Amino acid sequence: MAYDFVIGMDVGKYFHHACVLDPQSRQVLSQRINQHEGSLRKLFGKFLANNVEVLVVVDQPNNIGRLTVTVAQTIGADVRYLPRLAMRQLSRIHVGNSKTDVRDAYVIAHAGLNLPDALRSVDRVEDVFLQLKVPNGIDENLARAYTDLGFPVVIACVDDGVAVSLGSACRDSLSAAAVAALNEAWAFYPERQRVRSAGSAVPEHIRSVLDHANQVSLPEWTTPIDRLLGADQPPRRCSKAEDSVTPSALAALIDAGFDPIRINTTLAEVQEYGLTAVTVVVPGLVPIDFGWDRQRAQFMERPAQLCSQATGGIINPLETTCHPFA
């Protein structure tokens, strides 16, 4: 459909910028407009006189752009929506790199005049948003409920008073979180290679915990247990009775209840490798909006500080090339 005028609206919170083009792509008007119904009606009414066809194109059809869409539809203008991705791509073909309201409004108007296939119906967008609100709300509620009920655990592997490896997990039980965190801390402990090269067998006590932790770890944590312990030591599946076996520090941690607690102890099975296990359990420190899509470095920041205070050492940052969540 041919339009007599195309009005591109770069929508803002308090002000908009309007760019009006005629069918020959000549700029008729470029003006800042208040976010007010009277100002919008005056602008649209000026070009809708004498029964001309006007197309209004916005870059945001909802929230701060809802008033612009409603006013334009009420006075008889056709309204379309230019998706953000399409607008960014179109901006590359126009002169200049700066992002200004004047330039953005021109890009929107130019797309409405010359690239009608890039536009979307505002009614269709509204229907999609309404449909997405239901599953999105469920996802947010689940994430919030999991955060409220989950127990974060951070375990630091410490050598000579300095934490060289961190493991963290958040589960619906303190026991599951502890063994999952132990699994990760052991996996990134730098001296595990020395354990393998020395030919020392990992104690069965530790093996059973790591084997169990591998079963309850996060979906992103897919490294097989045999890769953590060494190919020459194949994994051994523990029985149901052995699933509950945990090192003494973890047992004491679990028995202590859900209050924040710090345990600075040495595991007899791990001490022969020169490793001191410092366990910090801090329920309730996970942000209320914690989600699995976030990097767990944010989740570990505060507990890591407690680890440092407990040992008097400095937490060394994990290598981003080896940590799957960094």
Image (tube, rainbow, N blue to C red):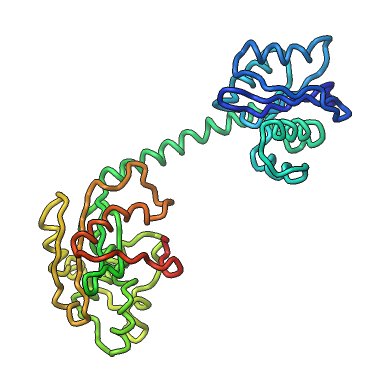
Horizontal side of 304 relative to 114 (left or right) equals left
Q: To which quarter of the image does residue 110 belong? A: top right
Is 184 rendered above or below residue 27? below
Q: Nearer the viewer, residue 157 or 33?
A: 33
Q: Nearer the viewer, residue 310 or 278?
A: 310
Residue 16: image location, x then y, percent:
64, 24
213 lies left or right of 121: left
Point out residue 57 in the picture as x, y percentages from the top left corner.
71, 28
Residue under the point 17% across and 65% down: 244
Apparent side of residue 7 relative to residue 146 in the rendered image (left or right): right
- The quadrant holding residue 180 is bottom left
Quadrant that contains the C terminus: bottom left
**Is 18 situated above or below 97?**
above
Question: Depth check: 38 or 270 in front?
Answer: 38
On the image, the x and y values in percent for residue 13 come to: 56, 26
**In percent of the image, x 25 and y 45: which residue is there?**
149
Q: Position of residue 209 (x, y in %)?
A: 23, 70
